[in-house]
Image (tube, helix red, strand yellow):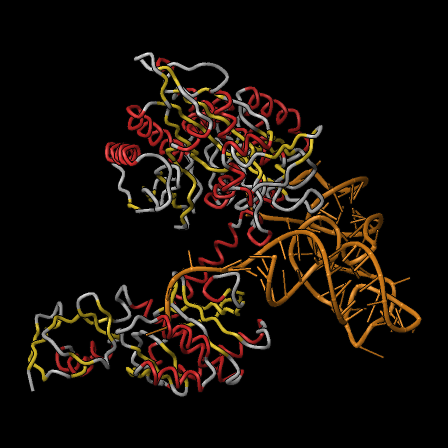
Amino acid sequence: MSEILVNLAGSGKSCNFAAGTTYAGIVSELASKKQAKLAMAVKVGDDLLDLSAVAENDAEIELITARSPEALGLLRHSAAHVMAHAVIDVFGSGVRVAIGPAVADGFYYDFEYEKSFTPEDLGRIEARMGEIIASGTVFTREVVSREEAREMFAGLGQTYKLELLDDIAEGEAVSIYRLGGFVDLCRGPHLPHTGFLKAVKLLKLAGAYWRGDEKRQMLQRIYGTAFANAKELKAHLDRIEEAKRRDHRRLGRELELFTIDDQVGPGLILWQPRGALVRRVIEDFWRDEHYRCDYELLFTPHIARRDMWKTSGHLDFYAENMYAPMDIDGVGFQLKPMNCPFHIAVYNSRKRSYREFPIRWCELGTVYRYEKTGALHGLMRVRGFTQDDAHIFCRPDHLADEIYNILDLTLHVLKTFGFDSYEVYLSTRPEKYVGSDENWQASTEALQDALDRKGLAYELDPGEGVFYGPKIDIKIKDVLGRSWQCSTIQVDFNLPERFDISYTGADGVEHQPIMIHRALMGSLERFFGILIEHYGGAFPVWLAPAQAVVMNITDSQIDYAGEVYKSLRAAGIRVEKDLRNEKLNYKIREAQLKKIPYMVVLGDREKYEGKVAVRLRSGKNLDPMGVEAFAAIVKRDIETRTDFHPVQG
RNA sequence: GCCCACGUAGCUCAGCAGGUAGAGCACUUCCUUGGUAAGGAAGAGGUCACCGGUUCAAGUCCGGUCGUGGGCUCCA
């Protein structure tokens, strides 16, 4: 029998073994007793392997323990098997299992069963899982022939497994894993035994189509999560709670920012006064920044002739997202899902010269798109929303600079809203596309060039571009670490062609301009939703609907409070007054719940000294000061768009 | 759109062997004039989402409609 040399990464230890020794055996030799006990799997090269697998060649192996980055995936995948085992134990062999992978925050398993599972069932399943885990049942792997596997799963009535089996490439080994009486077709690897599962929890039930295809069978999905220990599980559950507390739908109602009314319709947003105020501040900022960057503002209608949407191609490739046409004096009109054709119409209103380029037109354009009822979600997915849209008409040689300037503006805007961590994606030519290869190549290079100059690291998404041109997408990360795609910059060779727009070049000949579509925030509605969650409803002073609230302690300061209120207002501060006949505690509590940045408390002391006592929403107090001094503090927050007294958390 | 769950006062929720609704907060009025997260009392407020069915009787059972929530790419 041949010998192989195996060394344990990080330990400097190596040893000779007979080929065919299991990694468990190797580990027990090379690692300390303690380490060996903690080993969940081994990593050889890029491959994660079961401890029960055998080594055939010289190798360097790495121990996978609960602390390894790969551990969570392993734990969760094994937990999924334990769950499937438990479900079959509880509901019988009539349960058909589909797939059960580890996912970003946990794991799931999809089942088909005649009865639907109830939330109470989760408890029963979890209880049974607890028993399986406590038993320390081992996972065993077997490599079987296709025929054996087919026979076995057919015998078990596991038809989904048969289907999966058919998809395994010829030549690839077919492996099955046994866990007690439960057998699953699975690539693995798995934990040595269930005793490694220290913290598992089932979370929710959901429906999911077999293979994500809505034409196929609807299955019942059970989501769960697993962590290396109870503490980390709890931290995860706390994060879920925190996300719930920050849910923009809840805060939107509590802070009276927006509502959605059944009578009006689903996916249609009513901006309440406080929300509308925030929106106005956002829009003002947006417009100012665009004027600064040499954009011009447009306004365009909400409907247009159906013919226009035919020319633009929307009726061909976007019809399912558009609302039905309406008949106006015998002519078909349709609600706009995008603003671009209107901007082209503005372009076409007269002859254009290269001397005007680049033309930069922006619009806060409200569009309407059909979304499936099940997809609607608060402000995040709606049927009517306002895009912070812009279109740039230019020559190919302008492209790189224009993109650079757009990136510059985008990052500035995002940063101002407190987002300074980005993921950038560059999507290149897909299989089906319009435009010449030269144009694609030149503009893709222009995008790359701009990204490089801006010093932005990006990921390449080959073939993920839209059919009409390459694009850059920017995802922002909020305080909870969730990412949201808002900004997009797209080059378009298609619309200029379809509308046959042109400009007169320096050579006196007509040329076709290139068009760039871009949005920074994407949808004002959605961006507002993201902001609400990002700030947890405690907007920075420049955005806060109410920046300060003046409150008196007793009726004897009503006049003084009125004066303070007036001078703050005159200073341009959004101030409210609470002069009700209530105790100070009560007023503070209310202002606190409204997350108003500054509470101005006025009692006799302040009145006689001509000062104000300021409480921050963080709970801290500032030293008493004159009204002007206080106004200056608030003004500084507003002008710098940065809170000098940020809210914790 | 599909699966599951849910839809009772502005909000959060209770009610249920089917016998014609209840709490807390918010709101209104009165008392209280009180220094940094809820002072006290009284009052008003609901065709129990909508439509239909079963029943002597339905918020409670059945069916449908509308709406809300969790999901529906993360491949054995």
Quick check: A164 above or below A33? above
Residue B30, quarter of the rendered image: top right
Residue A111: x %, y % from top left: 50, 73
Above or below, A310 relative to A154: above
Q: Residue visible at 63% across and 25% down?
A: A562
Q: Is residue A51 left or right of residue A246?
A: left
- A295 or A24: nearer the viewer: A295
Q: Is residue A590 left or right of residue A466?
A: right
Q: Is residue A600 visible?
A: no
* Residue depicted at x 57% and y 23%: A569
Residue A577's x, y, as percent?
62, 31
Q: Nearer the viewer, residue B40 or A233?
A: A233
Residue A347 percent location from the top left of the image: 47, 20
Pick the front one: A189 or A567: A189
Q: Percent x, y for residue A635?
A: 46, 25
Judge whether residue A392 can be spotted in this image: yes
Q: Residue at x 20, y 81 (%)?
A: A24
Tally of marks:
0
Query: Where does the N terminus of chain A fall, quadrant-wise?
Result: bottom left
Question: Residue A25: which quarter of the image?
Answer: bottom left
Quadrant location of residue A182? bottom left
Query: With A439 as the anchor, is A290 left or right in this view?
Result: right
